[in-house]
């Protein structure tokens, strides 16, 4: 049960709280699947290599989480490890810790930005692929939805396995 | 709000957004069901005027939900109803959330098929001067519901202390 003092301050704090909440919900599901289910191919047809199994999806979720944080770090000239295109393979045993680590990395990225005004958030523009760009609020909203949508996909995979 | 059957999931990228919007609104409704009548209208000191009670937050959430749907409808040249400021009684809030969500799903469940390309490539500027494509505005709408659920949970903790 969360206490009042556990809530982060400001608009960015609210977004980080919801990012964390979504990640913890996902973690509670993937930590409780068996290794066999974790690695099992659920969708062999998909052209998206990230979405074949819970494992490939979680490799992608972790990689994307660092990608979102690094986009912000580049903007604030904060040290970051450039990500390659390869997805490190994360085992079912390791996934809980890896989710915690990407959350901690994101929290460290946002430290000091918690109480940005909406005008400041809108001016904080992050360049992404091609000519696509978004402000900090939009990037964090996308990050939250990225986790929520993949949690939904994991839920669907687990239902498929039951049938 | 986990689903029990695969066929309960909506299809495609748009379907996943609608499913998560529905889940966020369901969680919000679940929290509201725990609120007593006094707390629903109780003013919280130190908060902005538009968010200083659960009732005021919920009037805003419902109005904003119609507003988001209307941005999308307008961008796609679909009919829309004007948004309006309304005072919603606590006993009616659950039904009003359901109606607002239905108004959103109608955009995607009618004869007009919205493509993934339109979701990414149809842009518009909002009243608050931020440019979104449909996909981004949808994400904003979902997180809006999540953030106000969080805010109501904070209010309830304040009321206990």
Image (spheres, rainbow, N blue to C red):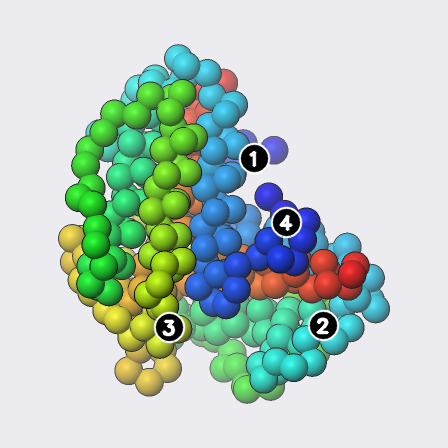
Indicate the position of residue A150 as horizontal and vertical percent values.
58, 63
Chain letter for mark 2 = A
Marks 3 & 2, CB-CB < 8 Å contact: no
Query: Dot 4 corresponds to which residue?
Result: B3
Sequence-first tag of 1 and 2? 1
For image coordinates 21% across by 54% down, the residue present is B79
Which-is-in-front pick, marks 1 and 4?
Answer: 4
Indicate the position of residue A96 as horizontal and vertical percent values.
70, 59
**Residue ranking furthest to the front:** B111
Q: Secondary structure at mark 3?
A: loop
Query: Dot 2 corresponds to which residue?
Result: A42
Question: In the rendered view, does B64 fall on the left or right side of A4?
Answer: left
Query: Dot 1 corresponds to which residue?
Result: A2
Query: Dot 3 corresponds to which residue?
Result: B115
Q: Can see residue A132?
A: yes
Which-is-in-front pick, marks 1 and 2?
Answer: 2
The answer to whether tags 1 and 2 share a subunit is: yes
Quarter-of-image position of residue A47: bottom right
Q: Is residue A113 above or below residue A58?
A: above
For image coordinates 34% across by 47% down, the residue present is B103
The answer to whether tags 1 and 3 share a subunit is: no
For image coordinates 34% across by 17% down, the residue present is B42
Quarter-of-image position of residue B159: top left
Chain letter for mark 1 = A
Q: Secondary structure at mark 2?
A: loop
Residue B156: assigned label: none
How far is mark 1 from mark 3, CA to CA? 40 Å
How far is mark 1 from mark 4, CA to CA? 26 Å
């Amino acid at each position: 049960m969360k206490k009042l003092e556990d809530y982060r301050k400001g608009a960015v704090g609210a977004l980080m709280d919801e990012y964390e909440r979504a990640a913890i919900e996902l973690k509670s599901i993937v930590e409780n699947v068996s290794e066999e289910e974790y690695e099992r191919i659920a969708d062999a047809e998909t052209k998206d290599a990230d979405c074949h199994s819970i494992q490939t999806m979680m490799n992608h979720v972790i990689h994307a989480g660092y990608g979102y944080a690094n986009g912000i770090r580049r903007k604030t000239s904060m040290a970051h490890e450039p990500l390659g295109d390869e997805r490190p393979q994360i085992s079912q045993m390791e996934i809980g810790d890896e989710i915690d680590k990407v959350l901690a990395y994101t929290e460290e990225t946002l430290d000091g930005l918690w109480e940005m005004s909406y005008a400041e958030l809108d001016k904080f523009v992050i360049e992404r692929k091609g000519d696509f760009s978004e402000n900090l609020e939009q990037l964090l909203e996308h990050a939250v939805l990225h986790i929520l949508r993949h949690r939904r996909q994991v839920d669907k995979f687990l239902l498929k396995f039951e049938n | 709000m986990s689903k029990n059957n695969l066929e309960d999931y909506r299809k495609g990228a748009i379907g996943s957004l609608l499913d998560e919007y529905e889940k966020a609104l369901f969680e919000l409704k679940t929290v509201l069901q725990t609120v007593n009548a006094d707390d629903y209208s109780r003013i919280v000191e130190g908060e902005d005027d538009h968010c200083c009670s659960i009732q005021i937050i919920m009037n805003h959430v419902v109005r904003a939900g119609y507003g988001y749907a209307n941005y999308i409808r307008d961008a796609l040249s679909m009919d829309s109803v004007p948004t309006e400021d309304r005072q919603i009684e606590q006993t009616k809030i659950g039904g009003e959330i359901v109606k607002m969500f239905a108004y959103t799903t109608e955009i995607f469940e009618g004869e007009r098929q919205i493509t993934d390309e339109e979701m990414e490539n149809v842009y518009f500027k909002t009243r608050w001067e931020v440019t979104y494509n449909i996909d981004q505005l949808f994400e904003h709408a979902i997180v809006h519901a999540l953030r106000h659920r969080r805010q109501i949970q904070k209010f309830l903790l304040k009321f206990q202390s």
